[in-house]
Image: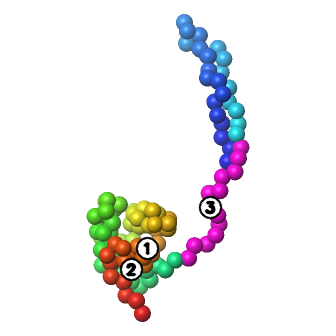
């Protein structure tokens, strides 16, 4: 990552307000690990189980927790994915794919074979 830090602010003429000395900046470079690149595996709800009725229940459960404000229309849209990710992130999983664990914590019934 590269960024700039202001070292000295600009100087202005008190009468005219014109800049007499521009601000001085220093460029900083460094590395920041954003994603380790390691795959994360987790048990997710099967796509066959993501029926409109199930997705609507998920949307209502997320709305009760203040994470979803859209309609409970049963559509797995980007807003629903963001709400799922917001619910799962504090639990160590930043993903819009609904995990079985999160579905169970939300009180949704999950079929298991």
Distance between the Cα atoms at labels 3 and 2? 29 Å
Give the main secondary structure of the magenta stretch: loop
Q: What secondary structure is marked by label 2? A: loop
Q: Is residue 63 magenta?
A: no
Residue 46: which numbered mark, if any?
none
Instruction: Tell me the residue at 67%/48% (across/down).
Output: 1
In contact (CB < 8 Å): disc 2 and disc 1: yes
In contact (CB < 8 Å): disc 3 and disc 2: no
* Between discs 1 and 3, the one toward the N terminus: 3
Q: Which residue is mark 3?
A: 35
**Image spot of residue 88 (x, y percent):** 44, 67
Viewer-nearest residue: 13 or 100: 100
**Image spot of residue 84 (x, y percent):** 41, 67
Q: Is residue 39 magenta?
A: yes
**Residue 74 appears in view:** no
Name the side, left or right, on which 55 lies relative to 15. left
Foreground: disc 2 or disc 1: 1
Q: What secondary structure is marked by label 3? A: loop
**Image spot of residue 23 (x, y percent):** 64, 24
Q: What secondary structure is marked by label 1? A: loop
* Residue 42 sits above or below residue 87 on the image: below
Foreground: disc 3 or disc 2: 3
* Residue 35 sits above or below residue 111 on the image: above
Q: Quadrant of the C terminus?
A: bottom left
* Circle 1 Cα neighbour tier, 10 Å, few/some/many (<14 / 14–19 / ≥20): many
Q: Where is residue 14, by image quadrant?
A: top right
**Image spot of residue 74 (x, y percent):** 32, 73
Distance between the Cα atoms at labels 2 and 1? 9 Å
* Between discs 2 and 1, the one toward the N terminus: 2
Q: Which residue is mark 1?
A: 98
Give the extent of the magenta segment: 29-41
Residue 50: which numbered mark, if any?
2
């Amino acid at each position: 990552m590269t960024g700039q830090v202001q070292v000295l602010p600009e100087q202005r003429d008190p009468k005219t307000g014109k800049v007499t000395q521009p601000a001085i900046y220093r460029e900083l470079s460094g590395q920041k690990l954003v994603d380790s690149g390691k795959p994360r595996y987790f048990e997710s709800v099967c796509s066959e189980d993501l029926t409109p009725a199930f997705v609507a229940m998920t949307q209502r459960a997320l709305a009760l927790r203040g994470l979803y404000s859209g309609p409970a229309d049963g559509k797995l849209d980007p807003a629903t994915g963001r709400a799922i990710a917001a619910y799962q992130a504090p639990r160590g999983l930043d993903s819009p794919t609904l995990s079985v664990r999160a579905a169970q914590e939300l009180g949704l019934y999950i079929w298991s074979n």
